[in-house]
Image (cartoon, rainbow, N blue to C red):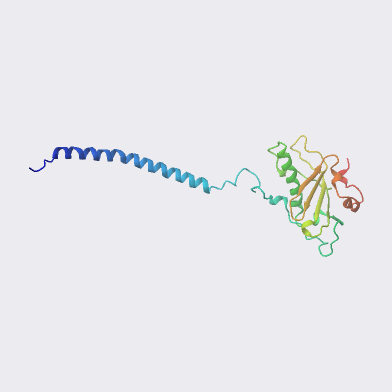
């Protein structure tokens, strides 16, 4: 006797299966959308340029702000060096005297920022006329030491850091503050003091 087929049961089972697929389809679509969004966010974060912004000089860690390394003229003593010999120089003889003074202003502004004055800028710091500029010959150009001694003016600040300032630059490196305030001029190389015939004017008073 042939087996009976439950046609009614088969017909009733199919709609139930199809209904389950239809219920799952929106969930799958939503899940796929969320995965796509998360992948997009991840790619955007990985490729974002996080080195920009912040209102600084635009350099990253380990780099020097270009404002601190203005071009200096070729040393007149380059062809006949005598290591340790002092040279008197003039700021106005440099390719860009304004850039040189601005570099010194940058160092002062950076120190004031580090001390808590977050709004100070290099444009607010002035190195007035009367600064002294000189060099100590090195074994080669990379070891030449350039020195600057001067005072500063910061009209926008009630109590700016004390004068005088002594700055130094080695080769093509950045200008840095060696010392400032009372006793700063004791850091000036003796050979330069001798070349200048005594303490430079900014050290007085």
Is residue 45 visible to us here?
yes
Where residue 73 sits, quadrant-wise, is bottom right
State the residue in front, 9 or 202: 9
Where residue 56 sits, quadrant-wise, is top right
Assign the C terminus to one quadrant of the image.
top right
State the residue in front, 131 or 53: 53
Q: Position of residue 193 (x, y in %)?
A: 89, 50
Is residue 94 visible to us here?
no
Asked if 205 appears above or below 82 in the picture, the reply is above
42 left or right, relative to 152: left
Q: Residue at x 18, y 37 (%)?
A: 12
5 left or right, relative to 128: left
Q: Residue furthest top?
A: 158
Where residue 2 sits, quadrant-wise, is top left
Q: Position of residue 118 (x, y in %)?
A: 68, 38
Q: Position of residue 135 (x, y in %)?
A: 83, 54
Assign the N terminus to one quadrant of the image.
top left
16 left or right, relative to 98: left
Q: Residue furthest bottom?
A: 79
Asked if 159 appears above or below 126 in the picture, the reply is above
């Amino acid at each position: 006797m042939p087996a009976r087929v439950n046609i009614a049961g088969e017909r009733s089972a199919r709609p139930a299966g199809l209904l389950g697929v239809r219920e799952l389809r929106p969930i799958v679509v939503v899940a796929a959308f969320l995965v796509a969004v998360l992948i997009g966010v991840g790619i955007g974060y990985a490729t974002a340029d996080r080195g920009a912004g912040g209102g600084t000089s635009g350099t990253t860690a380990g780099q020097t702000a270009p404002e601190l390394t203005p071009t200096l003229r070729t040393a007149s003593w380059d062809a006949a060096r005598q290591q340790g010999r002092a040279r008197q120089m003039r700021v106005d003889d440099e390719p860009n005297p304004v850039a040189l003074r601005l570099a010194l202003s940058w160092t002062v502004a950076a120190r004031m920022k580090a001390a808590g004055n977050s709004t100070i800028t290099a444009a607010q710091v002035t190195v007035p006329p009367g600064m002294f500029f000189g060099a100590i010959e090195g074994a080669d150009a990379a070891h030449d030491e350039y020195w600057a001694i001067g005072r500063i003016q910061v009209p926008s600040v009630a109590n700016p850091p004390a004068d005088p300032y002594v700055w130094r630059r080695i080769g093509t490196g950045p200008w840095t503050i060696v010392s400032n305030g009372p006793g700063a001029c004791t850091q000036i190389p003796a050979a330069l003091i001798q070349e200048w015939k005594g303490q430079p004017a900014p050290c007085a008073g």
